Image (cartoon, rainbow, N blue to C red):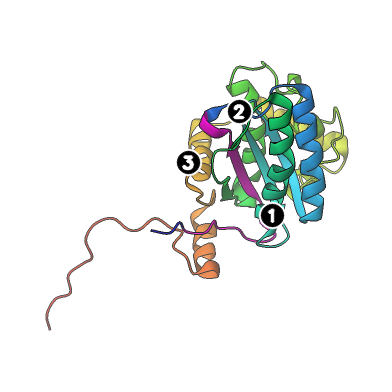
Amino acid sequence: MARQPRLILPNQPHHVLQRGNDNQPIFREDEDYLRFLGWLRECARSCRVAIHAYVLMPNHLHLLATPADEDGLGAMMQKVGRLYVPWYNAKHGRSGTLFQGRFRASIVDPDQYFLACVRYIELNPVRSGLVTSPLDYLWSSYAHHAGVRPDGLITDHVKYWALGNTPFQREAAYIQLVEQGLAGEELDAINAAVEKGAPLASHAFQAALERETKRRILPAKRGRPAKVKAG
């Protein structure tokens, strides 16, 4: 059976996950991270994709990004791969596939899950035990949102701007949110959505997506259909 196309919608944020093949490293040295980020910035601009958050982990990466059209997200990831993979293979004396199949993408309901998804992404190094504070990890967008180091890759989303009227207010509010962490059900919902390529969204948002895309989004109702009594 043919794979169903990814659900990508223009002007909606998407949580993107890309793993290394067989969970092997895709970044080994500082230069690897820097090269990837540089090419990601170029390709995001040329493909008209706004990057709102990111983290580059040793064997996988997460992005929160809004494409301007249906093809932009896929085109951006493809272009970055065509630039980075040959360079990485040549540098590290390897050949073949670096990434594990197609990237995964989950549409994010901005009203309910946008800021939770940003925190999920930027707290990944803490959950993985690489650092004790997200500020200690160089390869994420946390320093930008916390007001420590501006990041030219990042396009701030309206939901981040709504945290305060001034940069200081927004940064302080965001730091406080991160310090609160994420509830277990939020972690489970975000993990499940991106693994399945399903929307991370409220019931109402999913119902609206069904109407717009003419695709099944909401879970099918369980049980047998009710019998119709003979007249």
Q: Secondary structure at mark 3?
A: helix
Task: Identify the mark nearer the N-term, 1 or 3.
Answer: 1
- Residue extending furthest toward the left: 230
Does the magenta segment cover residue 115? Answer: no
Amino acid at circle 2: Asn
Q: Which mark is residue 192?
A: 3
Whether residue 122 is visible here, answered yes or no, is yes
Q: Secondary structure at mark 2?
A: loop
Does the magenta segment cover residue 21? Answer: yes
Residue located beneath label 2 in the image? 59
Look at the numbered discs 2 and 3 and tell me whether their residues touch, using CB distance below 8 Å.
Answer: no
Q: Magenta segment, which residues?
A: 4-22
Q: Which residue is found at the position 54% from the left and 48% from the top?
A: 200
Q: Secondary structure at mark 1?
A: helix
Q: Quadrant of residue 151?
A: top right
Q: CA distance from mark 2 to mark 3?
A: 19 Å
Q: Which residue is found at the position 82% from the left and 38% from the top?
A: 38
Amino acid at circle 1: Ala
Between label 1 and label 3, give the one nearer the viewer: 1
Task: Identify the mark nearer the N-term, 1 or 2.
Answer: 2
